[in-house]
Image: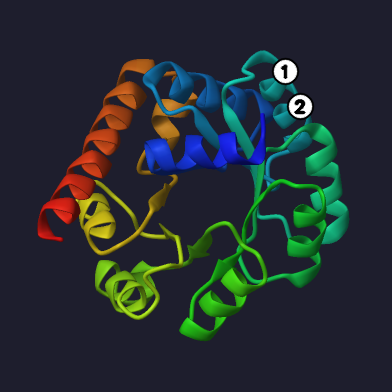
Amino acid sequence: MTRDQAKAGIEGIGILPGIRVESAEFARYCAETLYAAGIRVAEITMTIPGANDVIRDLVLRYPDMVVGAGTVLDKETADRCLDAGARFITSTGLIPEVIETVLKRGVVMVPGALTPTEVITAWKAGGDYVKVYPTAALGGEAYIRSLHLPLPKVPIIATGGVNQQTATNYILAGATAVGVGSELLPAEAVRRHQDHRIHELARRFIAMVKDGRQMRAAAQ
């Protein structure tokens, strides 16, 4: 999968599912269930035991899934994720050594940022997208709108506090995509392997992103 193909996959669905669970088995289950539900993007966080093995396995079994690594905080971890086949790397904050490592390998980079200065710095450093986190703490969709208005060329992924009540509004406010975790993958549904519940949540979030995009296009 090329860098452009990975970006097309992320932008096409408009959802970056953050998989942060207690075991590799649950992580595989989450990614597989989302894939079946139509969300063929998965961010495997480095807090999961054996996260790189999960990435390697998913990349081999689902070549059309955009599998990435999340919460990558240093160069060494970034290299291990890339060696495992990660198609994108995200960081919780702005970490120059991670950005440099990922860009040298020709992989999609999603640095984290919060303030306007951090957002601009992350974008100018070469970030394909900028993950604004945690958005809810700074005003939610109103904060994304306040960033998007002066920085319309910066592709923002709004993360932290995105739920069924706010997802559409984040897209309408200017976000390219939304990062969603437990609201899409509830702990109980994961533990009990409740495919039907996760499929329904996936359907809802896909529809919310679509609605937000249509409303934004109509308002332009």
Where residue 54 appears, as percent x and y from the top left, is 71, 28
Q: Residues within 10 Å of mark 1 (few under 14, many from 20)?
A: few
Residue visible at 52% across and 63% down? 130
Position of residue 189 measured from the top left corner of the image (x, y, whole percent): 40, 27
Quarter of the rendering containing residue 38:
top left
- Residue indicated by mark 1: 60
Horizontal relation, residue 129 to residue 134: left or right: right
Q: Is residue 151 above or below residue 195?
A: below
How far is mark 2 from mark 1, CA to CA? 6 Å
Write down the residue under mark 2. 56
Estimate how packed mark 2 is, as few (under 14), some (14 to 19) or many (20 or more) residues with alpha carbons within 10 Å: some
Q: Which quadrant does the N terminus fall into? A: top right
Residue occupying image coordinates x 48% and y 26%: 191
| Residue at the image position 29 percent from the left and 50 percent from the top | 163
Residue 196 visible in this rendered orientation of the protein: yes
Q: In front: 77, or 121?
A: 121
Q: Which mark is residue 115?
A: none
